[in-house]
Image (spheres, rainbow, N blue to C red):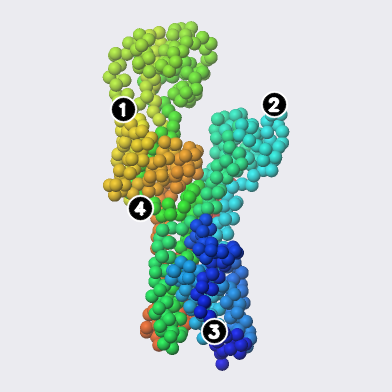
């Protein structure tokens, strides 16, 4: 005969009558034990706002912590004991079960007595109390094992994610080679400061952010960008801490060290993103908690009528803990996938907003464009040809360092021109350059400058008007007062933008807009070239947020993409905001999502993953509810429907929800394996060939 707990306790002589102060005693106890121990004072009964228990910290008391691993092991041991026919062993198993369930009891009673909330925890408590009092110790421990198994899976996933984050950034070197007075000196990493010159050799980790002063190299920077193709870097290029030199030797000047480096900041953001929750996740938990009271009342009434096991089955309708495990687990896995692809999402809630976006606004300079001009076209005039026009302009601009000069010099280098040094020069500040050569005087600059120098351009007025109206920058080149040609420049548009916009349109995003401080002709030309739906020109920095707000008031869900300090307010105003590695600190801080590659190659992938996450969460919620539906049907249609069947069905449902949450990561691993096999096959064929 299976004795009830009350009979066991009566035998031990420990049944007592609760006093009149039960509620106050429980209230005081819960306030003290729900936190680190504090003195029993007025503050203990009415805790100050400076030490609240947050929703997250309460959940951490039970789900997804190191203690779950221990609790699972103990509950499995308790299950083995309760399977025994010996009363003492069975009772011992029940006692162990009570011990491992203590955190659930604590949280459930805390919410009931302190917060006056009826939650799913109370259903778990009632189920366990009823099973305990009715002497069904085996069912009690079986239920506990299924609960902690799911929590243990979530804990393992969190630990895996944390481990990947710690391994994402290469181990920093303990020693660094500083260049002082032409001599390399080895110093501890902690002594490196902004302004220092650091020398890095092949296979060494770059210890701090900076820019190259001398040398060139290939760098493996997949930890920051997600790209495994080596990046070629040379003088003036930026380098980042935690990336590795593959070949070449460089000396670079440190701009940020220690906690100020990009790698350190990204690492901190990733650590905080591990525990973020989606709105759908929180709504599911809220809905589950709202159903807790009616389920508890119904189950209690049925149990009080003598149908204890049927009452327990009703109480097992609770779905909150499956939601708490499966939804965060799926979210965490998708966040991990994005991190591996070089996309940093600061909060899963921001990722959840992306499928609702119907409008994307792009800042122009430094975002749509690369922030530097390039030579689009050379228009020779008279007897000169294109090479001669570029050569004359390059001679004049050789000692200059402004963006237009650099664009002309790059074009000359591309054409293979050798540009001589000219000692005697005469400059007109900010308007143009005049250079005396053996065969004449070269004048280079704007239309206004050349006309002010007495050079007649009236015969080319229509050409110049058309170019300038179209938004191009035009440099006029003249030799001995005769126009030799026009160099037409434009801002270099990021090459991946067009394909990414097309892909996003196919995904259902309806409106793309350009926001810029440039004049209308320039904004119109770029917007047309990119097939954008609208453009906003001559926009002051503080007005960008007003445009976002205006579109939101029209009922649109707006994503803003920007990189500059003047984009920060608009980024905060938008429903979703995207920036990228290399953007200003203000933009990176304001944006919810950062593309670590520094470009937009992964923009469509970001939206693809966001849509997949939403689908996965809905599937997990469905799988969380399904076991309860099956148990209801079983209870109504099968007279001998058992608690064990209800527990096993709940376990199968929870397992399916967890498997669904894990599937995206498994799928990605399979895809990686397939690609590796294909790469190996290609290599083998090349060797055979």
User: Where does the image place residue 367, in percent across and percent down from the top left?
Assistant: 42, 37
Q: How many angstroms separate mark 1 from mark 4 (CA)? A: 35 Å
Q: Which residue is at 44% across, 23% downward?
A: 404
Q: Find the distance from the CA under tag 4 to the CA under tag 2.
A: 58 Å
The residue that appears at 38% across and 75% down in the rendered structure is 294
Whether 626 is drawn above or below 171: the answer is below
Task: Point out the frontmost of discs 2 and 1.
Answer: 2
Q: Nearer the viewer, mark 3 or mark 4?
A: 3
Q: Quadrant of the N terminus?
A: bottom right
Judging by the rendered image, the residue that carries numbered circle 2 is 181
Q: Position of residue 33 (x, y in %)?
A: 57, 67
Q: Disc 1 on helix, strand or loop?
A: loop
Circle 3 sits in a helix, a strand or a loop, which is it? loop
> In this view of the protein, can residue 545 be seen by the observer?
yes
Q: Residue at x 42, y 12 (%)?
A: 443
Q: Earlier in the sequence, mark 3 or mark 2?
A: 3
Q: Which of disc 1 and disc 2 is earlier in sequence?
A: 2
Q: Contact (CB < 8 A) between labels 3 and 2?
A: no
Residues at badges 3 and 1 in contact (C-beta under 8 Å)? no
Image point (44%, 13%), residue name? 428
Task: Name which of mark 1 and mark 4 comes first in the sequence.
Answer: 4
Instruction: List the residue tagged with mark 4.
Output: 356
What residue would you read off at disc 3?
17
Q: Which residue is mark 1?
A: 470
User: Which is more toward the observer, 155 or 385?
Assistant: 155
Q: Position of residue 548 (x, y in %)?
A: 34, 43
Pick whichever of labels 3 and 4 is earlier in the sequence.
3
């Amino acid at each position: 005969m299976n004795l009830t707990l009350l009979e066991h306790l009566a035998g031990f002589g420990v049944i007592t009558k609760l006093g009149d102060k039960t509620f106050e005693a429980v209230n005081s106890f819960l306030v003290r034990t729900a936190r680190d121990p504090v003195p029993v004072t007025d503050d203990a009964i009415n805790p100050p706002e400076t030490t609240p228990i947050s929703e997250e910290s309460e959940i951490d008391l039970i789900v997804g912590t190191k203690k779950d691993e221990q609790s699972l092991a103990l509950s499995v041991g308790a299950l083995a004991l309760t399977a025994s026919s010996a009363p003492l062993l069975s009772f011992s198993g029940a006692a162990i079960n009570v011990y491992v369930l203590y955190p659930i009891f604590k949280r459930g009673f805390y919410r009931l007595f302190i917060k006056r909330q009826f939650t799913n925890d109370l259903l778990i408590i009632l189920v366990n109390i009823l099973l305990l009092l009715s002497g069904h110790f085996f069912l009690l421990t079986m239920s506990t094992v299924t609960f902690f198994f799911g929590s243990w899976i979530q804990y393992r996933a969190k630990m895996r994610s944390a481990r990947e984050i710690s391994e994402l950034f290469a181990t920093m070197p303990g020693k660094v080679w500083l260049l002082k007075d032409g001599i390399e000196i080895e110093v501890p990493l902690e002594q490196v400061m902004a302004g220092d010159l650091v020398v890095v050799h092949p296979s060494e980790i770059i210890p701090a952010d900076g820019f190259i002063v001398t040398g060139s190299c290939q760098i493996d920077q997949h930890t920051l960008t997600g790209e495994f193709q080596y990046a070629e870097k040379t003088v003036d290029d930026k380098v980042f801490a935690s990336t590795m030199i593959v070949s070449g030797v460089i000396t670079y000047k440190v701009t940020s060290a220690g906690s100020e480096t990009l790698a350190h900041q990204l690492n901190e953001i990733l650590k905080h993103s591990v525990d973020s929750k989606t709105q759908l996740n929180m709504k599911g938990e809220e809905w589950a908690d709202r159903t807790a009271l009616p389920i508890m009342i119904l189950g209690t009434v049925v149990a009080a009528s003598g149908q204890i096991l049927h009452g327990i089955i009703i109480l097992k309708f609770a779905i909150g803990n499956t939601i708490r495990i499966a939804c965060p687990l799926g979210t965490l896995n998708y966040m991990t996938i994005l991190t591996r692809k070089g996309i940093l999402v600061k909060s899963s809630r921001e990722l959840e907003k992306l499928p609702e976006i119907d409008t994307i606004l792009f800042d122009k300079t430094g975002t749509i464009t690369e922030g530097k001009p390039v030579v689009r076209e050379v228009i020779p005039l008279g007897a000169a040809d294109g090479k001669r026009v570029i050569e004359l302009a390059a001679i004049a601009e050789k000692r200059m360092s402004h963006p237009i000069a650099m664009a002309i010099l790059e074009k000359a280098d591309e054409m293979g021109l050798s540009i001589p040094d000219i000692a005697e020069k005469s400059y007109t500040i900010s308007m143009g350059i005049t250079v005396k050569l053996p065969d004449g005087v070269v004048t280079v600059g704007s239309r206004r400058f050349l006309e002010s120098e007495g050079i007649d351009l009236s015969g080319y007025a229509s050409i110049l008007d058309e170019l300038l109206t179209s938004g191009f920058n035009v440099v006029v080149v003249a030799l001995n007062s005769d126009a030799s040609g026009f160099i037409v420049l434009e801002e270099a548009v990021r090459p991946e933008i067009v394909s990414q916009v097309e892909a996003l349109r196919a995904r259902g995003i309806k409106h793309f807009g350009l926001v810029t401080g440039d004049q209308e002709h320039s904004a119109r030309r770029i917007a047309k070239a990119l097939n954008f739906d609208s453009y906003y020109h001559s926009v002051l920095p503080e007005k960008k947020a007003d445009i976002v707000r205006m579109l939101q008031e029209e009922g649109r869900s707006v994503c803003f993409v920007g990189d500059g300090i003047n984009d920060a307010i608009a980024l905060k105003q938008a429903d979703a905001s995207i920036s990228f590695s290399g953007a200003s600190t203000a933009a990176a801080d304001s944006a919810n999502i950062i593309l670590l590659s520094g470009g937009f190659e992964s923009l469509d992938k970001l939206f693809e993953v966001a849509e997949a996450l939403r689908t996965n969460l809905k599937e997990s919620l469905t799988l969380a509810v399904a076991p309860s539906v099956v148990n209801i049907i079983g209870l109504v249609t099968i007279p001998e429907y058992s608690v064990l069947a209800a527990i096993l069905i709940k376990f199968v449902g929870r397992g399916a929800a967890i498997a669904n949450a894990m599937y995206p990561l498994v799928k990605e691993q399979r895809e990686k394996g397939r690609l590796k096999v294909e790469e190996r096959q290609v290599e083998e064929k090349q060797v055979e060939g």
